[in-house]
Image (cartoon, rainbow, N blue to C red):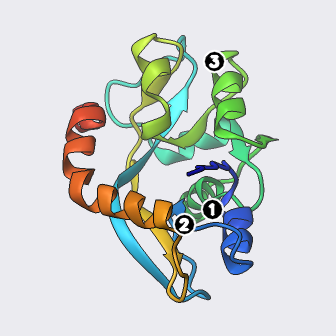
């Protein structure tokens, strides 16, 4: 039995699913153009993340303040980027300073280096928050909420290993979330 894990942006994941290259994928935005089956896993929350020395407002920051901040985006095709752009568009924010990076890890490193701010999934920020390497900046109408889903093509004949993994997820997901992700509820 072999498990291969590929971390890519939403666009690449969808292309790979379409070409039937993967058994399943973890996505927060379900593509409408594919017939998929899914297992809802847990909530995905995106917050404004900033450098550790950023001044945090006493009350939730007005989204217009983003016009004054250097913003760091994920690359085109990223669901995180799409959520961030949708939030910025909805608030009619004019972005003046912007940087684009290819991965959440690169975005985190840039934030920790004091290069800017970004709207990011909380699930990937635990260690950096705990170690005070970056912080969550309270902002109105954040977090952006979606759901992490495990998806696969409706017509896909899953391998025995993939089928067993699906069984395990269905049976154990509540305990896994409670054991490994209960810290998210603090935010």
The residue sitting at 72% across, 31% down in the picture is 106
Image disc number at residue 82: 1
The residue sitting at 70% across, 15% down in the picture is 113
- Residue 125 to residue 170: above or below: above
**Disc 1 secondary structure class:** helix
- Is 156 on the left or on the right of 15, as rendered? left
Q: CA distance from mark 3 to mark 1?
A: 22 Å
Image disc number at residue 112: 3
User: Measured from the top left, where is residue 53 in percent x and y?
Assistant: 54, 11
Q: Nearer the viewer, residue 24 or 33?
A: 24
- Is 168 on the left or on the right of 108, as rendered? left
The residue sitting at 59% across, 86% down in the picture is 34
Q: Nearer the viewer, residue 139 or 185?
A: 185
First reached walking from the N terminus: tag 3 or tag 2? 2
User: Measured from the top left, where is residue 152 in percent x and y?
Assistant: 52, 74
Q: Nearer the viewer, mark 1 or mark 2?
A: 2
Badge 2 is on which residue? 24
Q: CA distance from mark 3 to mark 2?
A: 33 Å
User: Measured from the top left, where is residue 151 in percent x and y?
Assistant: 48, 70
Number of numbered discs present? 3
**Disc 2 secondary structure class:** loop
Q: Nearer the viewer, residue 170 or 54?
A: 170
First reached walking from the N terminus: tag 1 or tag 2? 2
Q: CA distance from mark 1 to mark 2?
A: 22 Å
- Residue 15 to residue 175: above or below: below
| Mark 2 closeness class: few <14, some 14–19, many ≥20 residues within 10 Å | many
First reached walking from the N terminus: tag 3 or tag 1? 1
Verify CB contact (< 8 Å) between mark 3 and mark 1. Answer: no
Q: Quadrant of the C terminus?
A: top left
- Is 181 on the left or on the right of 157, as rendered? left
């Amino acid at each position: 039995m072999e498990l291969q894990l590929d971390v890519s942006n939403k666009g690449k994941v969808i292309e790979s699913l379409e070409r039937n290259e993967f058994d399943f994928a973890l996505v927060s935005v379900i593509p409408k153009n594919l017939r998929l089956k899914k297992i809802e896993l847990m909530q995905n929350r995106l917050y404004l993340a900033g450098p550790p020395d950023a001044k945090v407002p006493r009350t939730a920051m007005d989204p217009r303040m983003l016009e004054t901040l250097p913003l760091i985006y994920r690359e085109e095709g990223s669901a995180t980027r799409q959520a961030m752009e949708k939030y910025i568009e909805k608030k009619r924010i004019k972005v003046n300073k912007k940087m684009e990076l290819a991965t959440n890890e690169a975005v985190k490193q840039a934030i920790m280096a004091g290069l800017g701010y970004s709207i990011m999934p909380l699930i990937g920020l635990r260690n950096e928050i705990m170690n005070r390497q970056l912080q969550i900046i309270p902002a109105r109408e954040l977090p952006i909420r979606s759901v992490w889903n495990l998806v696969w093509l409706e017509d896909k004949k899953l391998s025995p290993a993939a089928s067993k993994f699906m069984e395990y997820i269905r049976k154990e997901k509540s305990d896994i979330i409670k054991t490994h992700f209960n810290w998210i509820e603090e935010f």
